[in-house]
Image: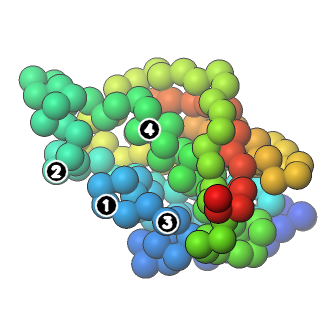
Amino acid sequence: MSSASASGAVDSRMDIHEILNYLPHRYPFLLVDRVLEVVPGERITALKNVSMNEPFFPGHYPHHPVMPGVLVIEAMAQTAAILSFKTMASKPDDKSVYYFVGIDNARFKKPVGPGDQLVIDVKLQANKRGIWKFSATAKVDGQVAAEADLICAVRPTP
């Protein structure tokens, strides 16, 4: 684990039980398995273990299973949500919802398949009036699989 920067302390790892406290997603849409490191207000590194048992593989594609790119982006957004809540020192509740509101500069560089482990790095770029901007990268075996700039917002539940 790397050391903290001058502006924030490194939080400890998060297992799936703690992640479930920070994300409202559940199977089959929970796409973060472990957090390796989080520095509130700065960055987070998380893992998604990709298994042949994923519900999308039978249809995408049966002859050559590939994790849909939109789900790789979603895994990055869920990782960003954990960083946001850790930064706010709060957890999701039924009074607000964390929306994914934009994707810029998305690029897919390497297919992700069964047996791969996505290492997701997200950096906070800005937070103004409840709008969060992040840069995110997902790697497999040290190679970039996908990258994007993400925009999210916390809003009151309608």
Q: Position of residue 69 (x, y in %)?
A: 41, 29
Instruction: Compute the Cα span from label 3 to label 4.
Output: 18 Å
Which quadrant: the N terminus?
A: bottom right
Q: Closer to us: mark 4 or mark 1?
A: 1
Question: Residue most toward the front?
Answer: 158
Q: Nearer the viewer, mark 3 or mark 4?
A: 3
Q: Quadrant of residue 134?
A: top right
Under circle 3, the secondary element is loop
User: Looking at the rendered structure, which numbered label has been put on residue 72?
Assistant: 4
Q: Which residue is identified by label 2?
A: 53
Given the image, on which type of amino acid does mark 2 rest? Asn
Q: Dot 4: within a 10 Å radius of its alpha carbon, few (fewer than 14), some, or many (20 or more) residues?
A: many
Spot occupied by residue 107 in the image (x, y as percentages of width and height): 54, 21
Q: Is the residue under label 1 in contact with that under label 3 (CB below 8 Å)?
A: no
Marks 3/2: CA distance? 22 Å
Q: Is mark 4 on a helix, strand or loop?
A: helix
In the rendered image, is residue 132 in sight? yes
Q: The residue tagged with tag 1: helix, strand or loop?
A: loop
Disc 2 and disc 4 in contact, CB within 8 angstroms:
no
As measured in the structure, the alpha-carbon distance from the residue carrying label 2 to the one carrying label 4 is 16 Å
Name the residue rendered at 71%, 75% in the picture. 90
Identify residue type, mark 3. Answer: Pro
Q: Name the residue under label 3.
A: 24
Circles 3 and 2 in contact, beta carbons < 8 Å: no
Q: Earlier in the sequence, mark 4 or mark 1?
A: 1
| Tag 1 residue | 27
In the image: residue 146, left or right of residue 117: right
142 lies left or right of 111: right
